Image (tube, rainbow, N blue to C red):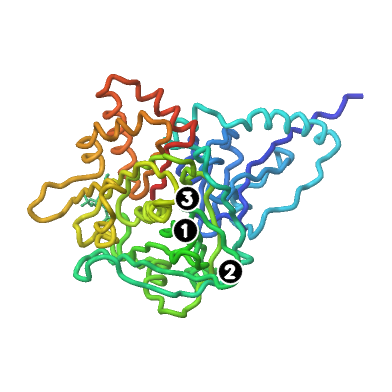
Amino acid sequence: MNAPLPVEVLKQHLIDPEICIRCNTCEETCPVDAITHDSNNYVVDPEICNGCMACVPPCPTGSIDNWRLVVRAEAYSVQDQFGWEELPQEKSLPVDAAVAGDAAQQAAGAQAEPAAAPAMLVTPGAAVPPWSAAHPYVNLYTHKTPITATVVGNYRVTGADTESDIHHIVLDFGEQPFPVLEGQSIGILPPGVDAMGRPHHARQYSLASPRDGERAGYNNLSLTVKRVTQDHGGEAAHGVCSNYLCDLAKNDTVQVIGPFGHTFLMPNHPKANLIMICTGTGSAPMRAMTERSRRLIGTADIGKLMLFFGARTERELPYFGPLMKLPRDFIDINLALSREPGQPKRYVQDLLLERAAQVRGLLADRNTCIYVCGLKGMEVGVLDALREVVVQSGEDWSILHEALRREGRLHFETY
Ligand code: A2P
């Protein structure tokens, strides 16, 4: 009698729809385009995914790191996954398959080491935090168990006569624990339903305040939110969550999930230097890190802070007034204005080149961490400028770039 054919088992890569905040990071990161989404879920196509793991470290929530052993012929299809509200339970495999499954699991485990080559190609930043970063808490509150925050402030931080309607919004958590670190983000659940009648998904916002609160010692935090009135192509569009947030009044309540993020964190050792490069609302984590450092003046040995901040005009640069009041011996501020009447158009990458000597000096110090946050488009320009700064001094950018990534010293958050 013939022996039964072994059943092929797949360690199927899945995304937990209850944790996922639909930030699109995984879809952007996947080097083989195995990740896609509909209006409900982000999903992994089992026909395409090769388990390279490139998408796992950048995911702010960890929802991407889910796996099920399945008989390959019965793998969950993309259509199955679009309909899920939660991950399916682990299924037991047929006996033959289970044996093959152990092998598959081992094989998949072997693959599960982050594959250096694709990760290097798809994400220019580090997948680990700086060595001295504090421990971040993530996913304490989820779509099913959100926390209620109260609005205690909502102010416009750009000139009233400008197109850029950017708000500084302060949320208070009262007696409920909500521990955060600079560089982390939270999710806001806007009320109401989408065009399909389903509750809106969470929208992710970076914290603009330091770990000990927008007001030091208070259980509150702040966000920097730009009212979205256009899509990326310049067509009129109504941003569901940004408009909701910008219109909130004091004492309104908001449903919050998170915190998220375990790598875009600041170093905590003495003399750590920060190079911060941002555009528009990408200034939120830079404000948080700057304020954290400012509060440490006189109590800790803080390193150098260098800020490159891009905006259309001074009046469209969020927090312009308070920023300019910071002592110059505390932070080296470089403003790149692109539409200031009578001035040449400048981007942050132009200023990095203009300040090459200072940037190079900081890059040569292993205590320096670099943070880039803002428009997706600036990623390439900033990397090119950093490369140019290093190459000008006869050094090898690829070696330094790899060290910055490996040591958790170069971080990107772009959208
Ligand atoms: P621009 O005037 O060319 O749009 P926004 O106000 O749209 O959030 O943009 C913030 C700043 O980032 C603006 O000064 C904008 O300039 C600038 N910017 C746009 N594209 C890039 C890019 N590829 N690299 C760096 N800065 C950019």
Residue hosting label 1: 204
Q: Which of 373/286 is in front?
A: 286
Q: Position of residue 266 (x, y in %)?
A: 46, 46
Q: Is 356 above or below relative to 306? A: above
Specify the amino acid type for callout 1: Gln
Instruction: Tell us which disc is closer to us: 1 or 2.
Output: 2
Q: Is 361 above or below relative to 45? A: above
Specify the amino acid type for callout 2: Ile
Q: Position of residue 286 (x, y in %)?
A: 37, 51
Spatial separation of the CA atoms under disc 2 and disc 3 = 23 Å
User: Which badge, 1 or 2, is on the more N-terminal residue?
Assistant: 2
Could you tell me which residue is drawn at 49 percent across and 26 percent down?
117
Q: Secondary structure at mark 2?
A: strand
Could you tell me which residue is drawn at 30 percent across and 70 percent down?
156
Mark 3 is surrounded, within 10 Å at the Cα level, by few (under 14), some (14 to 19) or many (20 or more) other residues, namely some
Mark 2 is surrounded, within 10 Å at the Cα level, by few (under 14), some (14 to 19) or many (20 or more) other residues, namely many
Q: Is residue 72 left or right of residue 163?
A: right
User: Which badge, 2 or 3, is on the more N-terminal residue?
Assistant: 3
Instruction: Tell us which disc is closer to us: 1 or 3.
Output: 1
The tag on residue 292 is none
Q: Quadrant of residue 206?
A: bottom left
Q: Report the residue that reaches farthest toward the left.
A: 342
Residue hosting label 2: 147
Q: Which of 63/263 is in front?
A: 263
Spatial separation of the CA atoms under disc 1 and disc 2 = 15 Å
Residue hosting label 3: 24
User: Which badge, 1 or 3, is on the more N-terminal residue?
Assistant: 3
